[in-house]
């Protein structure tokens, strides 16, 4: 990843066009910067969002923006989504390649019985609520389009309070909307994961995934977070002080440097422990062994963490209840 987080230019251009429709007068230097490189520094994206939300009199302008986004605005990730066989495959693409769109937000899938929640985990410091609404509006719009209208979510979840009348949200999103929730996300029936998509293409998908892997690797190379990830995977029991020591810095300094890449040691380690646990359980490793490997004080502590990550216990996941 670059030393500073960034966003794909195509997604940025969608926001520029929306801002212009709102009558926002973007400063000439900013317009030039936003029209230039393949990726836009997050600092410039922050300025754009501030201008857009400040100029709009519509509290749901960002949600409308997201609902109008097309697959092409998501760069190669959008093309990957269009080439998936099923909605479940599409969710997998989002969880793996969302950093290509913007590398300080990610998705994860949590299952609980007959429901699935696509959680959106952003790390924005500017216009967070509006950007979350835009992202989830985009998810609903694309899911409905790619399934020819068969996608019918149970609810959309926002961790923030309603910014307009809740009924206005429901009219715009076409489903129940819940506010001040533990997470941001879209709740759906698990059966929808098998829903076929309108432009599935296996050969094209394989080619696009190769290109996306290369792009993702280029974003991550030479970054501090990439080196931290490697150390955590090698030594999942280590905390920030031990990791920082390996990199020649204190744990506190490590956190400051990671903050420059819009991430914290805690969130990075949590994400990696989640991934390591899932892979180990799928490989048939005993719950107790996985818990010990990851450095949890006991199986109960591991079970609490895993339930937070996946919405079920490690034992339930190992039995295949999530599949």
Image (spheres, rainbow, N blue to C red):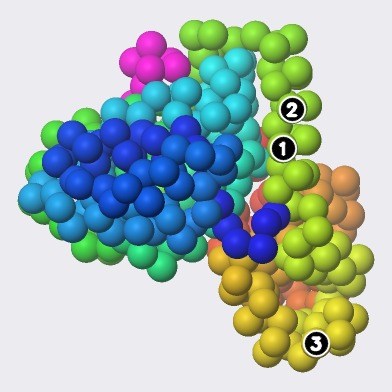
User: Does residue 146 belong to the magenta stretch?
Assistant: yes
Q: Are marks 3 and 1 in contact (CB under 8 Å)?
A: no
Instruction: State if disc 3 and disc 2 touch (CB < 8 Å).
Output: no
- Residue 117 makes an appearance in the image: no
What range of the chain is rendered magenta? 143-153
Q: Which residue is mark 2?
A: 211
Q: Which residue is mark 1?
A: 215
Q: Which mark is residue 249?
A: 3
Residue at 39% from the left image edge and 35% from the top image edge? 13
Residue at x-position 8% and y-position 50%: 57
Q: Residue at x 87, y 46 (%)?
A: 283
Q: How far across and down, in percent of the image, does residue 191 sit?
A: 50, 26
The picture places residue 288, in percent across and down from the top left corner, at 84, 68
| Side (left or right) of 279 relative to 141 | right
- Residue 149, label in figure: none
Query: Where 294 falls versus 55 (above or below)?
Result: below
Label 1 residue SS: helix
| Image spot of residue 174 (x, y percent) | 22, 31
Count neighbours of disc 1 (C-alpha within 10 A) and say few if under 14, some if 14 to 19, many if 20 or more: some
Mark nearer the N terminus (3 vs 1): 1
* Quarter of image, res 224: bottom right
On the question of residue 230 being in view, the answer is: yes
Name above or below for residue 299 compared with residue 193: below
Secondary structure beneath dot 2 equals: helix
- Of 87 and 201, nearer the camera is 201
The span from disc 1 to disc 2 (Cα, nearest Å) is 6 Å
């Amino acid at each position: 990843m670059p030393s500073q987080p960034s966003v794909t230019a195509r997604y940025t251009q969608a926001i520029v066009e929306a801002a212009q429709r709102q009558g926002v007068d973007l400063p000439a230097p900013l317009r030039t910067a936003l029209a230039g490189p393949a990726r836009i520094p997050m600092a410039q994206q922050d300025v754009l969002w501030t201008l857009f939300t400040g100029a709009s009199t519509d509290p749901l302008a960002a949600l409308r923006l997201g609902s109008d986004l097309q697959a092409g605005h998501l760069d190669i990730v959008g093309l990957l989504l269009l080439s998936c066989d099923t909605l479940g495959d599409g969710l997998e693409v989002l969880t793996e390649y969302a950093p290509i769109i913007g590398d300080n937000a990610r998705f994860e899938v949590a299952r609980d019985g007959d429901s699935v929640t696509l959680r959106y985990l952003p790390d924005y410091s500017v216009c967070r609520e509006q950007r979350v609404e835009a992202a989830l509006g985009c998810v609903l719009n694309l899911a409905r389009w790619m399934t020819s209208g068969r996608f019918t979510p149970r609810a959309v979840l926002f961790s923030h309070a309603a910014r307009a009348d809740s009924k206005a949200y429901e009219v715009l999103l076409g489903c129940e909307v819940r506010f001040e929730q533990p997470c941001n996300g879209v709740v759906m029936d698990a059966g929808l994961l098998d829903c076929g998509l309108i432009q599935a293409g296996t050969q094209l998908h394989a080619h696009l995934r190769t290109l996306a892997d290369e792009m993702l690797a280029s974003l991550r190379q030479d970054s501090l977070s990439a080196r931290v990830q490697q150390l955590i995977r090698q030594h999942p029991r280590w905390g920030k002080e031990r990791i920082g020591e390996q990199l020649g810095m204190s744990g506190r300094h490590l956190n400051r440097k990671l903050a420059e890449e819009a991430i914290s040691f805690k969130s990075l380690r949590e994400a990696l422990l989640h991934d390591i646990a899932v892979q180990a359980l799928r490989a048939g490793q005993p719950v107790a062994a996985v818990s010990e490997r990851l450095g949890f004080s006991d199986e109960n502590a591991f079970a609490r963490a895993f339930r937070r990550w996946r919405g079920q216990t490690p034992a339930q996941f190992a039995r295949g209840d999530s599949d």
